[in-house]
Amino acid sequence: MNLSERDKKHIWHPLTQHKTAKELIAIVKAEGASIWDEDGNEYIDGIASWYTSMYGHGHPKIKAAITKQMNTLDFVMFSGFTHKPAVALSESLIRILPTNQQKIFFNDNGSTAVEAAIKMALQYHSNAGEKRDTLIAFEDGFHGDTFGAMSASGLASYNAPFEDFLLNVIRIPTPQKHNLAEVLEKLEIAIAENSCAAFIFEPLVQGAAGMKFHSAKGLDALITRCQTADILCIADEIMTGFGKTGKNFASDYLTQNPDIMCLGKALTAGMFPLSITSCSQAVFNRFLNDEIHKGFFHAHTFSAHPLGCAAALEGLALLNASEILTQRNSIAKSHEVFVEKISNHLKVKAARCIGVVLAIDLEVEMERYGKLRDTLYQHFISQGIVLRPLGNTIYVLPPYIISAKQLQKIYDSIEEALLLM
Ligand SMILES: *Cc1c(COP(=O)(O)O)cnc(C)c1O
């Protein structure tokens, strides 16, 4: 029996309807921008394995850093103890995060980073004797799959069976050039009619919604309004962080600093599950008290895992290294040229890019989304490319180290895909 057959016996996969799912591909090796299956077929990882492996799979420097760390200190719990990889990582991150971010709280995955952020915001108010019980979030946002994170998420397809068990959330549309006044008015009503604790958002790019963009100026206006009402602003940069939008963080396009930030995914260059919830000094100070329970009683067993911290530190050293910067810029330029080229295609409704994120919305009726997605996915796989279209959107988010030839192969394959529609 091969791996795919053995897998079927006992494994339950995420985001999978096993009754109708196609055969899974067993991957046995990954290097650079490619992965290989058990039959020796190579695939270009066009979305960097959910935007994590931005420096390529198996980057030798990151592997070496993890190995070195493993040989000195594999793991120790992070309550009552600290260690050098965590301390060094906190110092390096503070240097590049928006200037008001002063404290680093460690978790083990994106959803738990969001969960910690939401709990911080709720307790921030309760520590001051205020019960604020409502969150503000964008329509179609995605923040993860644990209950708090899921509550903040607005994608019905993920949440439907759990709707009755979620936190109170008021949803507002994302700010675009044409609708800012209207969105601000909706925010005003939300603030007037509820006791709002926090506003959580994916800054500038909504990933799972189909790489949808919104206006930095509009987001600044929303943050400003929230902060005057002491509503904590949580920037979920789990997808956008670490260079994807062209700057270190999407928040770097804003003039207003978020109070809390969530980091994950590319944080460890795709080599280790680790996430961070950072916050301002003012948020942290709200938890300082002689009463022990005013502290933040939240922990995950693998908080600040030394191996993850070591990978993250080395990843940060690579983020703005000159060879990576050159690659980031050249991918961004290629995307722009391709967007220009494809925008007028009859089957293309809209195309857009920012940094290394490229998205193409196809002209197709909603009833056909599911079928189209499967057709496109299979088309790309058959050509040795991994892309995971979302709804009617094809997106590309390649590792920074992808070669010009590999990137061109992806563009060509997308153009061929348009002929299938
Ligand atoms: C992936 C993602 C999450 C959830 O992270 P997990 O590690 O999958 O739990 C949260 N927010 C955003 C914006 C994401 O892209």
Image (tube, rainbow, N blue to C red):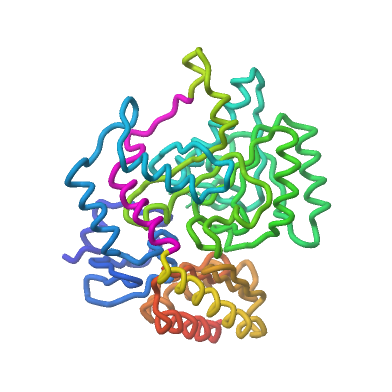
Where is the N terminus found, in terms of image quarters? bottom left
* In this rendering, position of residue 232 left or right of residue 290: right
Place of residue 336 in the rendered image (x, y in percent of width and height, measured from the top left): 59, 78
* Res 152 visible: no
Q: Residue at x 61, y 53 (%)?
A: 203
Q: Is residue 299 magenta?
A: yes
Q: Residue at x 54, y 55 (%)?
A: 249
Place of residue 3 in the rendered image (x, y in percent of width and height, measured from the top left): 21, 63
Above-or-below relation of 117 to 143:
above
Q: Nearer the viewer, residue 395 or 270?
A: 270
Q: Residue at x 31, y 29 (%)?
A: 81
Q: Nearer the viewer, residue 249 or 340?
A: 249
Where is the C terminus found, in terms of image quarters? bottom right
Name the quadrant containing residue 193: top right
* Res 120 visible: yes
Above-or-below relation of 343 to 139:
below
Place of residue 5 in the rendered image (x, y in percent of width and height, measured from the top left): 23, 63
Name the quadrant containing residue 409: bottom left
Above-or-below relation of 140 to 337:
above
Residues in magenta, as a range: 296-320
* In this rendering, position of residue 69 left or right of residue 286: left
Above-or-below relation of 262 to 354:
above
